[in-house]
Image (spheres, rainbow, N blue to C red):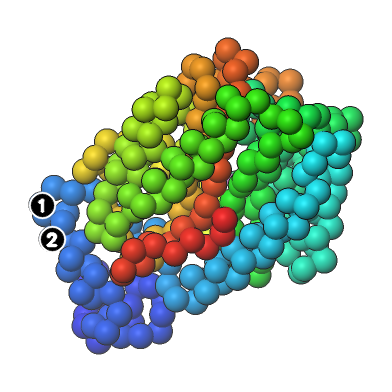
Amino acid sequence: MKLGRNDLCWCKSGRKYKSCHLAFDEKLNALALAGKLIPNHDMIKNEVQIAGIREAGKLNTEILDMISEHVKEGISTGEINRLVHEYTIAHGAVPAPLNYEGFPKSVCTSIDDVVCHGIPDDNRILKSGEIVNIDVTTILNGYYGDASRMYCIGEVSEEKKRLVQVTKECLDLGLAAVKPWGHLGDVGYAINTHARKNGYTVVEEIGGHGVGIDFHEEPWVSHIGQPDTDIVLAPGMIFTIEPMVNMGTADVWQDEEDGWTVRTDDGEPSAQWEYTILVTEQGTEILTR
Ligand code: MF3
Ligand code: CO
Ligand code: CO
């Protein structure tokens, strides 16, 4: 069924198609005819959804700012979990990880060789010399924001500090590669190029993801990528960029006992930073950092 110019737009904005996504669809259709992969309509958020996801993202950033004061030598990851959980609930929101596909806690805490999805534990005290990723995802009024940051605990080696710094640069270069009507493959290419130039490797099996109405939506975001490949990036798309960069091998394994913890094969450290971003007409907006 083809939408008429005066029909209501598929994005549920309540506006007529001709004054909403008609020109947008014409542009995408031309790109599809030119052989490009184009995003589905369900990857495109409307203004009401964007506003809701922006609010969830703001609170998510506030939670990371709050926890940043506490991520120090001597605190347990279980205590970090409690602080995130209580702050989230006190602000009328829900921590998305809790009970997500059986995840037992409200935040992920991933130390040293743990690549991602580390489970907080009251008996796991942060020690000087460790690097830790805190990954917070918040549901506010049904909308999701997802971001993570790295922390250096006490006296950290120059080697590990550099891994943390270069991984942040990878995220920022990935973000800079996001161009409206550009390609998703450009993002991973920028990330992988910078990581390799610095002697590091990028985890291949786990990627970023569409987010906002649900925790993990399409598209899947590779942090490897090739230029001018993968789907076209259109205004209204919201997804995470969350490169996992390893000091040694790119290979990882998942703990079968807890079902979650992902570690590097060689036990060398891994770092990760994550933003949720919106593709706009002009460029990008970071929704949570
Ligand atoms: N926040 C993670 C991400 O960036 C997902 C964690 S899933 C959980 O996609 F269940 F472990 F929380
Ligand atoms: Co996350
Ligand atoms: Co994510």
Q: Nearer the viewer, residue 103 or 71?
A: 71
Q: Amino acid at mark 2?
A: Ala
Residue 225 falls left or right of residue 27: right
Q: Secondary structure at mark 2?
A: helix
Q: Amino acid at mark 1?
A: Ala
Q: Which mark is residue 16?
A: none
**Which residue reaches farthest left?**
34
- Asked if the residues shown at circle 1 and circle 2 are in contact, with their CB atoms under 8 angstroms apart, the answer is yes
Q: Is residue 127 above or below residue 272?
A: above
Q: Residue at x 58, y 24 (%)?
A: 159
Residue 216 falls left or right of residue 44: right
Asked if the residue at label 1 sits under 8 Å from ligand 3, the reply is no
The residue that disc 1 covers is 34
Residue 64, given in percent of the width and then of the height, sits at 69, 54
Alpha-carbon distance for marks 1 and 2?
6 Å
> Is residue 254 visible from the viewing direction of this image?
no
Mark 2 is surrounded, within 10 Å at the Cα level, by few (under 14), some (14 to 19) or many (20 or more) other residues, namely few
Q: Which mark is residue 30?
A: 2
The C terminus sits in image quarter:
bottom right
Mark 1 is surrounded, within 10 Å at the Cα level, by few (under 14), some (14 to 19) or many (20 or more) other residues, namely few
Q: Is residue 130 above or below residue 51?
A: above
Quarter occupied by residue 89: bottom right
